[in-house]
Image (tube, rainbow, N blue to C red):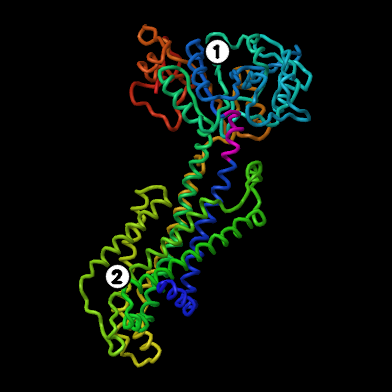
Amino acid sequence: MFVLRMAVRETRASWRRLLFFFICIAIGVAAIVALRSVIQNVRAVFGREAKSLNAADVLVSTTREWTPETLQTIDRRTEDAHVTARSETIETPTMVRPAEAGKAVVRMVELRAVQDNFPLYGTLELDGATYTHELLKGRGALVRPELLAALDVHVGDEIVIGQATFTIRGVITNEPGRSLGTFSMGPRVLVDYDDMAATGLTAFGSRVRRVLLLKVPDAQIEPLVRALHRDFRDDFVSARSFRSTDDAVGQNFDRAENYLSLVGLVIVVLGGIAVSSVTRVFVLQKMRSIAVLKCLGARSRQIIAVYLLQILTLGLAGSLLGVVLASLAVNAIPYVMTAPAGAASLLKDVQYGVSLSAALQGIGIGVLVSLLFSLVPLLQVRGVKPSMLLRDETVAASTDWLRIWVMVLVSSGLVALTAWQAASLRVGLIVCIGFTLLAGVLQLAGRVLVRLISPLASTRSFPLRHAVLHLSRPGNQTRVILLAVGLGAFFIVGVRSLQNSLLAEFSVESAANSPDMFLMDVQRGQAEGMRQFLSARGVPAASYQLLPVLRARVTGVRGRETSLESFEDVRARGSLSREYTVTYRDRLEDNERVVAGAFWSGPSTEPEVSVE
């Protein structure tokens, strides 16, 4: 009770001196909690949207026909994972044209055949209508609005897909299962799964992708994906969860969250330096009170416990105030910031507020920093003797092993704290080593500064003489202030530079000569018309290129045919298993050079090829 009563009395008597301590912790914790909470709030929206972006929890896909053995394995795994819903789609790029004979126009589209329970997540939205699968029954089709304009058709008109004719029954405005950032070969067209066979597009040689969409309890998602990976590691079957999309988007959020938390930690560390300085000055001012307590029988560890309890209480109170400040700042975001164009569909759903994990982390960091930065100054209590009340005494300089061990403990704690916030032990070590080196340089600079200006102590100018003497008097804060200001300036510049670097990595940078637009599937007979079209609209010929492009596979090398019927064949053949881009242009691009042989300059008497 002695420790508790003394802590209360000291706090009541000295609260003004410790107010700066309290504010430093509050501001640092507020920064950490606010920054981490905002990132978590925005990321939560992407997590919720990820299922709609995929229209399922787990996607199992193949570019070949489902074999009975494959389906049997999938059935077994889905039964073990307690799958609650299942749907199948078929996807392929193909050509579409109007059924009306007078309209000689063809467009490439991305065709998807769906079953009646598609989508498992999200809502398929139509322009002026509500989606039901009955719209697709009897060879109905739903199309994107750009296809209507390209083919000059309307709802109710017929279009030809492969060998079958379909009636347009609706216009798609929003489609689940179309992930962000994917490159589209053309507008989407939806048809009924049972009508796909009539198109003839699933025959041998077609580029068809079959996808099973599964709805799985959250706890079973990752185990199911891992099991399917093991089962089909030697087959042309892939499995992924909605989290793969969430993580692809969320990796940047992880990095941003850890980066911003590290920035918040820097603010807390700068506050910790102030905490250390305040604690040191506070102990120096309490020397005689400590000597009196020792005369009355108090032991050093009791007195240290008094001040330690006081500091931890202030650290906890400052941390709680920081959480309150963070909550006010985060909840004010919707009133001071509007979502940028193009991102409103997701950002409008963000529920801004302080997350529990961020608040707990902030409180923990505030208390730990208060403890770590006050331990070393508090050890001065051990050197105070009762005889100090009778005469001035200077503690003899000697090796204090306890102080050394505490400094090692504090350093280890800071490394652990930094690694926790950066989610990387390596980053934590780098930051702390850099922090230590910088602190050493600034401390050395402080000593050099005091020594350089010491001759001015004998100047005739009264203000200058006393200013110089003040910098070197006992108990001065010259080096501490220089350390805090120097670290602050360093971190402001460093954080700004790192921010620019991080934003540069997040952005997709393009070369100056990168195209702004791609026009695909321009046929040989349409090339001249395309040139005239562009010329009539003031587009100079030097600003565009028409490149002939085909997709092909290598079927034989030196007269021997290649077989790619199994996964082992693909592995054995290596790069021969993939599709190649083939062109017949008659020139090299700026980024190409001939490393062997010679590039042809005119027609050849025999088939020739240049390969990468």
Q: Is residue 601 above or below residue 1?
A: above
Q: Which residue is mark 1?
A: 206
Inter-mark Cα distance, 2 to 1: 73 Å
Q: Identify the image quadrant of the N terminus.
A: bottom left
Q: Is residue 50 a member of the stretch shown in magenta?
A: yes
Q: Residue furthest left?
A: 398
Residue at the spot of label 2: 444
Q: Secondary structure at mark 1?
A: loop
Which is the main secondary structure of the residues drawn in magenta?
Answer: helix
Label 2 close to label 1 by CB (< 8 Å): no
Q: Where the C terminus falls, by quadrant?
A: top left
The magenta-colored residue range is 46-56
Crowding around mark 1 (Cα neighbors within 10 Å: few <14, some 14 to 19, many 20+) is some
User: Where's residue 346, x and y in %?
Assistant: 63, 42
**Above or below 59: residue 508:** below
Judging depth in this view, the residue of 248 and 574 nearest the camera is 248
Question: Is 111 on the left or on the right of 511, as rendered?
Answer: right
Q: Report the amino acid beneath label 2.
A: Leu
Question: Which percent across, then down, holds residue 250?
Answer: 51, 41
Question: Residue 443, position in %: x, y?
Answer: 32, 70
Is residue 481 visible from the viewing direction of this image?
Answer: no
Nearer to us in this view, 250 or 397: 397
Residue 438 visible in the shown view: yes
**Residue 275 placement: quadrant:** bottom left
